[in-house]
Image (tube, rainbow, N blue to C red):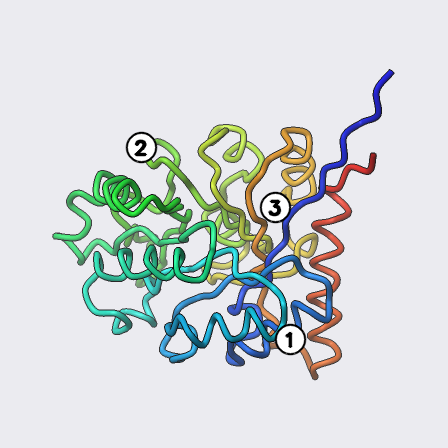
Amino acid sequence: MTDTPVYRPHVALSTSSLYPQGVPETFDAAQRLGYDSVEVLVTHERMSQLTHQLLDNIQKYQLPISTIHAPTLLFTQQVWGKAWTKIQMAAKLTHQVGAEVVVAHPPFRWQRKYARNFVAGVREVSRMTDTKISVENMYPWRVGGREAVVYSPHYSPLGQDYDWVTWDFSHAATAKMDSLAAVKELGSRLGHVHLTDGSGQTMADEHLLPGRGVQPVAETLEYLREQRWQGVVGVEVSTRKTKDADERDEWLAETLSFARRHMTVEG
């Protein structure tokens, strides 16, 4: 009889979880609370873009950066210029700071040239830069009371020929998708996870703490545990409604505990 092998998830704290605070505050919280690494969302904040400053934080806090989230959000459209430039620069930054994966959103429909060959283009940049580029699931928007698909080729990565996919539970709630079924369908193409949740009652991107929404988050993490999945779980929860820094730490510690509780296998 052999012992069950130890399995412990790698959990990163995303800078988006501390927004509008920045990179140093995220490193500080990640170190104090026991996270394994940091996920950096590249924004207008200069420190999120500059290799030497990111490396300084790695050295100061003795904590790695595992993930670079490319500035492909609506509010970061002016960061790093053209769409493909964003992806290429994110891949370059990933190598410079020793990270493992780039997270990118699919194009908006009005980015016609960028969207035309997006799936093939991501694969080409990934191959040329030797970088895992993981495309995130998104959700439909509601415009004038009607649902509008604003992402191309689609807000859902299911059925798209991406090599790697990032699965976000909050986005899945907004899109009314079943995360457990989706993760099973993605199989080995699951490249990254954004740990969060959503109520499924709004078209907003809520980023609730896991377990406080309707998504089968615990069940999905337990499935990944059974599969001994080797990716990074990036904590991407909104803490803007916390009353103070202590409560924010409590929320972030609760989310880390949730990940470890549902994914760890002791020897």
How many tags in the picture?
3
Mark 3 to mark 1 CA distance (whole Å)? 30 Å
Q: Which residue is mark 3?
A: 215
Q: In terms of sequence position, does the residue under pointer 3 or pointer 2 come before the other?
A: 2
**Residue 116 position in % (x across, y down):** 15, 45
**Which residue type carries mark 1?**
Asp
Left or right? Give the position of 141 relative to 114.
Answer: right
Comparing marks 3 and 1, which lies closer to the viewer? 1
Comparing marks 3 and 2, which lies closer to the viewer? 2
**Residue 209 position in % (x across, y down):** 65, 60
> Would you say the residues marked 3 and 1 are in contact, meaning their CB atoms lie under 8 Å apart?
no
Q: Residue at x 59, y 58 (%)?
A: 12
Q: Which residue is mark 2?
A: 161
Q: Residue at x 19, y 49 (%)?
A: 115
Q: Which residue is mark 1?
A: 28
- Quadrant for the N terminus, please: top right
Q: In terms of sequence position, does the residue under pointer 2 or pointer 1 come before the other?
A: 1
Mark 3 to mark 2 CA distance (whole Å)? 25 Å
Q: What residue occupies the far right of the structure in this picture?
A: 1
Mark 2 to mark 1 CA distance (whole Å)? 38 Å
Question: Under tag 2, what secondary structure?
Answer: loop
**Which residue type carries mark 2?**
Asp
Q: Residue at x 49, y 41 (%)?
A: 177
Question: Under tag 3, what secondary structure?
Answer: loop
Label 2: few (<14), some (14–19) or many (≥20) C-alpha neighbours in 10 Å: few
Label 3: few (<14), some (14–19) or many (≥20) C-alpha neighbours in 10 Å: many
Q: What residue occupies the far bottom of the structure in this picture?
A: 244
Q: In terms of sequence position, does the residue under pointer 3 or pointer 1 come before the other?
A: 1
Q: Residue at x 47, y 57 (%)?
A: 98
**Residue 246 position in % (x across, y down):** 75, 79
Left or right? Give the position of 69 relative to 34.
Answer: left
